[in-house]
Amino acid sequence: MIQSIDYYAVAPLLVLVLTAGAVLLLDAFLPRRPYARPLLGAVTLTGVLGALGVVAAQAVRDGDPMRTFCVPAGLPGPARAGIGALDIGTLGSGPGGPGGPGGAASALCSFVVDDFTLVFAGLALAAGVVVVLLSMAELSAGDVPVGEWYFLLLCTLVGAVALPASRDLVMLVVALELVSLPVFALTALRRYDGRSSEAAVKLFLVSVVSTAVMLFGVSLLYGMTGTVYLDRLAQVLRGPVAEPMAIPGPDAYASVLRIAYDLPPVLIVAVVLVIAGFGFKVAAVPFHAWAGDVYQGAPIPVAALLSVISKAAGFAGLILILVAALRGQIAVWAPLVAIIAALTMTVGNLLALRQRHAVRLLAWSSVAQSGYILAPLGVRDDEAASASIAYLVFYAAMNLGAFAVVMLVSRRGARGGLDDYRGLAFRNPAAGLALAFFLICLAGLPPGLAGLFAKVVVFRELVDGGGAWLALVMAANTVVGLYYYVAWAARIFTPVPVTEGAGAPATVGGAPAGAGVPSAVGEVPAGAGVPSAVGEVPAGAGVPSAVGEVPAGADVPSAVAGRAGGGRAGWVPVGVAIVLAGVVAVVFSIAPQVVLDLLPEGLIASG
């Protein structure tokens, strides 16, 4: 069997793949000169922007969704499935099937470019632009292999773009793993960093376990239905068909598909396992324990990637499975998702309250945000998933902006504690105001109306869909989230007392060395004479710390010192990333309808 390929449909993937190959070749053959690193970053950024341009061109085209990697409509399926007789040809002959109206467009296709695909692909690539800019700053220090970094990053983006277009279980799993596998390699690329290695191992173990759980559920779905295509899964699981359906072709005849069965308990097990597998990917409770340590141990660009691109890919896959394949079982999975959403937003906010480290706070607040995104999926409303997509788009701009400012502050050699941000608005007004705006957006307070509009969209869907109790839980959690976002923002505008700052070494937050107070993340104050439990070395030890910090006055190579001092090559891309995220967040705050207009009307095209 020969399948035709629509190369325009897969053009964004081709651009990213070709860029990844070009990066590897350039890294292998370019001389080790100062211009090599920024050149590879520029090539990567150009490739991501090119793929984003193709997605934009696909979005403005008229016509039906593009489909490729399709199986001929008349290809017979297995004679029996686990729940009864199955004939794919018969299933596809109803309205919208290959034999009915629009049948040619509804053949069994593995790759479909519809509005749903374009929204998630655009989100992943736009976030990828910011992550590449942050990576250029991270790699300017010279202690990370640049070619491998950009190659792995582009591979992750390939998976993130392919996943929302996937319309069969096999391609869905492959795309999801293509998103996940390069990330823990990126986490471990910062060599001789014990915390990064620990984070990579934890992320690897979580990824393996989640994949195994999800594959078990997927295999049960295939075993019960005899098909891997999502729309055929939905048709098989919909129940018995009572009306005759015509089979196309010269020997057409009337037939009745009789599947007299009650959905077996194993189907419920399959649904639970699939939700659990995706729950690991999006850090939903009770599969969230890895988030804090991994975010803190990973380089900041990787943490930003995990919080937006990886999370968006996980939610895209979850929505495809639940809405496209298991819509008929909404009575089974909607209450389960609602409970998980309530637990996720509650636990995430409570853990964020206790954090004194900036990245850990963003990690646990990201868990809470996952609960908000999950909440609309917990009501029995076909259109509620659109609210999840809208919230995800709003959240991406705000969270990426916050990570960009954290990246900027970390390049001054700060340890990452919240107290390092005290008085930031006076030392660096642009960065301080930007971070405060992103935090206010995440909290949902004016003037950061983007976060408020995102929460209003979710509240409306919850109330209209009969999830009033879940709306009350979300309202209570929103109030809890206000505390730590506002408390962090207040530190930015709190002046550093002169007695603390006088004569102290140059730090980024007015937390002078030798203050004698250990931070909440286990750091040891200067002069304690004992390395901390997380592998940091006290100031004055003459050795760079395990997390890339450089003690004051230490004689270290310039490549390492560049991380703390940050030359122009490192500052410029971070500043551009902050400006981009800030502009988008301001636009979303002024005109939220821009996001709402992007939402797919039919959500997911029949594949």
Image (cartoon, rainbow, N blue to C red):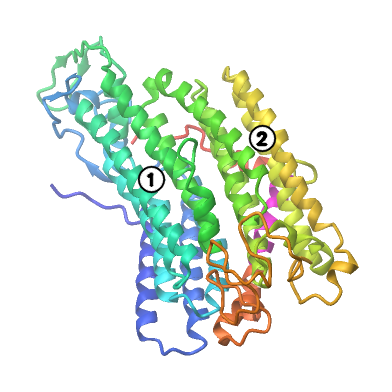
Q: Quadrant of the C terminus?
A: top left
Instruction: Classify mark 2: helix, strand or loop.
Output: helix
Q: Nearer the viewer, residue 94 or 374?
A: 374
**Image location of residue 461, percent across then percent down:** 60, 26
Q: Nearer the viewer, residue 131 or 325?
A: 131
**Does residue 513 appear in this view?**
yes
> Are the residues at dot 1 and dot 2 in contact (C-beta closer than 8 Å)?
no
Mark 1 and mark 2: Cα distance apart in space: 27 Å
Q: Quadrant of residue 246?
A: top left
Residue visible at 39% across and 72% down in the picture: 148
**Does residue 94 appear in this view?**
no
Q: Is 291 located above or below residue 269 in the figure?
A: below
Q: Is residue 590 magenta?
A: yes
Q: Is 132 located above or below residue 354 in the figure?
A: below
Question: Looking at the picture, which amino acid does disc 2 mark?
Answer: Lys
**Image location of residue 239, percent across then percent down:** 28, 15
Q: Is residue 422 magenta?
A: no
Residue bearing mark 2: 455
Question: Looking at the picture, which amino acid does disc 1 mark?
Answer: Ala
